[in-house]
Image (spheres, rainbow, N blue to C red):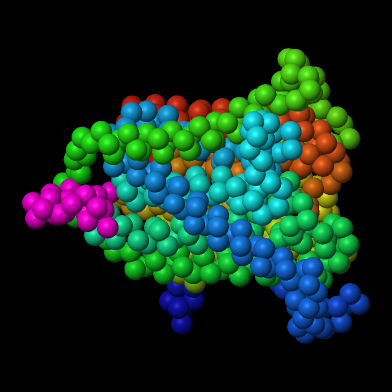
Amino acid sequence: MKSRHKSIRLRPADITIAVMTLVFVIILICPLFSLFSKAFLDSAGEFAGLGNYIEYFSTPSLSVSVTNTLTVSCAAAVFGTLLGFLYAYGLTRTNIKGKTFFRYVAMIPIFLPTVVHGLGLVYLFGKQGVITGLGCDIGLYGRTGIILSEIIYTFPQSFLMFLIALNYADGRLYEAAESMGCSSLKKFSHITIPSVRYTLINSLFVCFTLAFTDFGAPKVLGGSYNVLATDIYEQVAGQFDMNMGAVVGTLLLIPAVLSFGVDRITTRKNNDGISSKAQPLKIKTSKARDGAFYVICGGIALCLLCIVGVLVMGAFTKYYPYDMGFTLENFNFNPSTGGIQSYMNSLKMSIVTAICGTVFVFVYAYFIERGKCFPVLKNAGRILSSLPLALPGMVIGLSFIFFFNQKNNPLNFVYGTMIILVLANMVHFYSVPFVTASSALKKLDREYENVAESLKVPGWKTFCKVVVPMSLPAVLEIFMYYFMNSMVTVSAVVFLYSARFKVASIAITHMEEAGDIAQAAAMSLLILLINVAVRGIYEICVYKMKKTHKYGGNET
């Protein structure tokens, strides 16, 4: 009996991971429970069963939003995946020059809020747009504009997935196919496509989900073309119908959960590892192929650069298109739409999110992957850490309203403050940093802890002086990921910001609504500059670490 009591004695690691798991449950599971329970209640707080869902789908103006959302999401998934694949193929399987330049240009949409993608399209294809003025009116507002904006949004996500998949290839397969007289088309269809089939499936689902749950593009370009994301905003912010907002929120979860499931299935089935005997793929010279991909990659890069170009034009001209004189007045932001204070608020929120998120993610991942804790707590931590990947930002924001805005909730004091924005961002962007931290920690030799334990060195000292320094590239990447995404997010904070603490991405939306397009462009450039600067600092730090061979870990 004594030995049994000793075996279940709580250790500091058990207490720490238990407390962190409890925190995760409070800021993730409890808000989601509040969201789902609200969807099944009527305005009086009585149980309504499926009544709210029946009412939603029986209202033509609302139910049509489902069809509209499916239309734009399918189009964005197909074209975003196609362009992402072609761009990645050009950078990995051809001999075109300037691959580094093309790779960085592809990241431009990630550095900007989705609202800004729509804003750039307004400058290009709006009623007074640059291209419209040349006689090419595409009818931007509505379905066309949303699809174009979502393609811009989803393209870099697809590109990054295919870039990783296409970078790994066994040259022996292509050499064998060539010795048997197979044509380039046959090698492409029988070797290349099968090797990236799971990436292809994942890309389609990821792009579909991103477009399905995006709020920024429909807000700017939707007009009378309603989608689910704008429906939530109308129900909650416009009509204060929280129950119907919860109904739409649960509908937004469907594709995200499906995408999450597909990702897990394809990851499990994807056993196409590269053999240790594999040979690097030798890319043969082909002027026709390289010329074609110069056109494809150059065309896509030009489109993305045009988005930035028109933002620069709008930000530094007096009154586009009537007075094209240079001015800096557009950076003197109107306080009524947020002012420069909204930009400073975003910086503050993003820095705090990056610091708190990085510490929480890395410490939690450490206890899960390397801590001597109860297996039950470790498994619970892994499950909780994967859940945010399936949660759209608007769902997180809406669930936080229902949970933290309850008067009997002791955590009610965080509502309307920066704290709730930080917590929402930590949850929303949690899963990718967790995978990054776990991957880095798994690569470290466990002998470090064993030796430290044999020398009776405290675990916290080993963690601070050995584990963290050797995982520094991963830690910096997590910090950068949290910071950049917190600067550009709209959906996760659109329901949570207060009048006293408005952030830049929301301020851009309000500027666009008020007709201050030039100021919105100016604010967009400030966000782009800070994100590019942070990414540049990260790249320099990682380069120096790799050059000196001082730290372990890999860039993911």
Most common SS among magenta residues: helix
- The extreme right residue here reads 44
- The answer to whether residue 35 of the structure is visible from this angle is no
In the picture, measured across the screen, residue 502 lies left or right of residue 445, that is right
* Residue 422, image x, y percentages: 69, 47
Q: Is residue 447 above or below residue 308?
A: below
Relative to 409, is 286 above or below? above
State which region is magenta: 168-189
Q: Is residue 160 magenta?
A: no
Residue at x 35%, y 61% (from the top left corner): 197
Query: Which residue is at 49% across, 76% downward?
Result: 5
| Residue 264 x %, y % | 44, 67
Q: Does the magenta run of residues contain 170?
A: yes
Residue at 46 percent across and 53 percent down: it is 81
The quarter in which the C terminus is drawn is top left
Which residue is most to the top? 326
Q: Is residue 547 visible?
A: yes
Q: How many marks?
A: 0
As rendered, which of 188 and 429 lies closer to the eye?
Answer: 188
Q: Nearer the viewer, residue 57 or 159?
A: 57
User: Which residue occupies the foreground of this view, 41 or 337?
Assistant: 337
Give x and y (percent) for residue 441: 40, 50
Q: Report the side of 535 relative to 493 (left or right).
A: left
Residue at position x 77%, y 62% in the image = 231
The answer to which quarter of the image holds residue 349 is top right
Q: Is residue 49 left or right of residue 535?
A: right
Examine the image and state in which quarter residue 72 appears: bottom right
Q: Considering depth in this image, is 107 or 339 the residue closer to the camera? A: 107
Residue 433, relative to residue 342: is it above or below?
Answer: below
Q: Please state the horizontal and vertical placement of residue 54, each as a whole percent of the image.
A: 77, 81
